[in-house]
Image (spheres, rainbow, N blue to C red):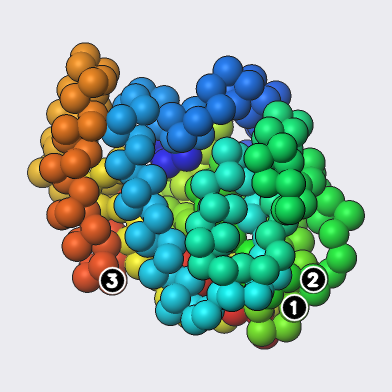
Amino acid sequence: MPYEPTSAHAESGAEPSEFDPRGYWEERLGGTFSLGGVGWLGLGEPFNNWMYKVRRHAFRRAVRHAVGDARGLRVLDVGVGTGFYVERWRELGAGDVTGIDLTDVAVEQLSRRYPDARFVQADITESMGGLAPGQFDAISVMDVLFHIVDDDRYRQAIANLHALLRPGGTLILTENFLHGPWHVGAHQVSRSADWILGLLRETGFDVLRRRPLFVLMNTPVDSESRVLKGWWWALMNGMARLPWTGGVVGAAVYPVETALTATLREGPTTEIAAARKR
């Protein structure tokens, strides 16, 4: 899901939390197994559908630049949710698709939907779910990492992703890459670009590319622009009052958003990055 704002701020790492991510997502996906369920709950299904259209463009662009031809690749999607990126990898021709998710509901639903793929219930911050090291040519971990609120578990997740990739394999990820203070909440932590990029390098990744995932269609968490903050406030309040307008607003903003994400090198909110295992 996209970054949702919190009121807490910190200059350095997150403190361990009592938050139970598995229980939270079991309940959430069990109640709404849809893009609206894994997306931004307050913005409604119509607007979330347009947000995922933007994600599709950004993801395909990132894979094209970092991987090239995905046909026949062995790929893993971490935090698979409702299977949106499983479908994207299949569109791109990946030959062997595996998904990891915290929840039983995602594994059960997607195993029925995609009987030719493999789905594993596991917590990437603890283990590799029984998957073999070096098994994958590419891994995607999309809108997942900022939900890991404990820094040590975050480090372990990156180490596990590195282990699962073959040498030269590619990691596609989304993060918020802040240039200012960290934003720390009970369910999400937005960390600094320096910390995230440093961890990737230390673990054995070379970062290839970073580009905006969104510019106008997500919280401007990495911007002090009053215009962007005012736009987002108006959008959220409008969707809360009249959620049916999300389809109209999303359709109007979509072409502008896809143009901005294709041309800007950095954005005010979540970005998509590609890194290669040394």
Instruction: Return the residue at label 2.
Output: 135
| Residue type, mark 2 in image | Gln
Give the residue displayed 23% in from the left and 21% down from the top: 244
Is 175 above or below relative to 10? below
Badge 3 crowding class, 10 Å Cα cut-off, few under 14, some 14 to 19, many 20 or more, is few
Residue position for label 3: 265
Residues marked 1 and 2 touching at CB (< 8 Å): yes
* Residue underneath mark 1: 166
The answer to which of marks 3 and 1 sits earlier in the sequence is 1
Secondary element at image label 3: loop
Q: Residue sitting at 32 percent across and 52 percent down?
A: 54
Q: Is residue 205 above or below residue 113?
A: below
Which residue occupies the foreground of this view, 22 or 20? 22
Q: Amino acid at mark 3?
A: Arg
Q: Position of residue 194 (x, y in %)?
A: 47, 66
Q: Residue furthest left?
A: 227
